[in-house]
Amino acid sequence: MNVENCSNCGGVIGKLEPAYVSRGNVVCHDCYRKLPNTEDKQGQAAIKKPIAVVITLLVLTVSLLCLVNYIHKVNYIHKKDQLSEKDVKLIEAFIHEMNLLNEVKLTDERSYEVQKVKFDAAYKDLSDLGSNSNSMRRMSGLAFDVWIKCDFARHSWEMREFEEWKKRHDDASQSGENLVKAFRSLQGLESEQKTR
C-alpha cells in the first residue's frame, strides 16, 4: 500500500492507518472526524435560515388570521346582540298587555280573565317569535319572570287569598318595572351605538 497525504491537513496517512474519503478527497482519520461536523454545521446553518423565514411567515399568517377572526366575531356579536324591529314590537306588545293587566280591577273578574288571556298570548308571542340575540334572551328571561309572578298572583286571586295576592301582585309589578328599565336601557344603548 502506498503512503498517502491528507488532502485537508497535508499530514501523512501511515501504511496501517485507514484512509477516509470526504467530498471525493482522501483525508486522515482526524480530519474525517472534523469534516463531517463542519459539513453538518454548514448544512444546518443553510437549512436554519429558510426554516426561520418559513416559521416567521407562518406565525405572521396565523396572527393575521386570528386578528381577522377576532374582528369578524366582534362585528357578528355586535350585530347579533341588537334587538330587531320585530323584537322591539314583541316586547312593546308584552309591556302594553302587562300594563293593562295591572290596571284591571279585582272586582271585574271577567275583564281580568280576558286581559290575562291577552297577556299570556303576548308572552307566548315574545318567547316563540323573538330572535335569538343576547339582548332578546335577556328580555325573554325578564318577561318570563313577570309572566310567572302574574300567574302566581292569579292563582292566589282565584283561591281568594287576597293578602297573598297583594304580595304576589306587587312582586309581579316590580318585575315588570325591571323589564321596562332593561328595555329602555337597551334602546338607549342601541341608539347610542347607531350614532357612532
Image (cartoon, helix red, strand yellow):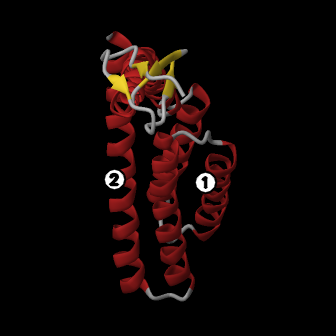
Residue pointed to by mark 2? 178
Q: Which numbered circle lies on residue 123?
A: 1
Find numbered disc 1 in the image and state the secondary structure of the residue it sits on: helix
Q: Quick one: 4 or 195, which is closer to the camera?
A: 4
Provide residue 172's location: percent of width, then percent of height: 40, 65
Which three-letter amino acid code belongs to the residue tagged 1? Tyr
Answer above or below: position of 15 versus 3. below
Provide residue 88's location: percent of width, then percent of height: 53, 33
Q: Is residue 28 visible?
A: yes
The quadrant the N terminus occupies is top right
Residue at the location (51% across, 27% down)? 76
Residue at the location (33% across, 33% down)? 30
Q: Is residue 125 left or right of residue 194?
A: right
Q: Residues within 10 Å of mark 1 (few under 14, many from 20)?
A: many
Residue at the location (59% across, 39% down)? 90
Q: Is residue 118 left or right of residue 85?
A: right
Nearer-N-terminus badge (2/1): 1
Answer above or below: position of 154 versus 27. below
C-alpha span from label 2 to label 1: 16 Å
Residue at the location (50% across, 77% down)? 152
Q: Residues within 10 Å of mark 2 (few under 14, many from 20)?
A: some
Which three-letter amino acid code belongs to the residue tagged 2? Asn
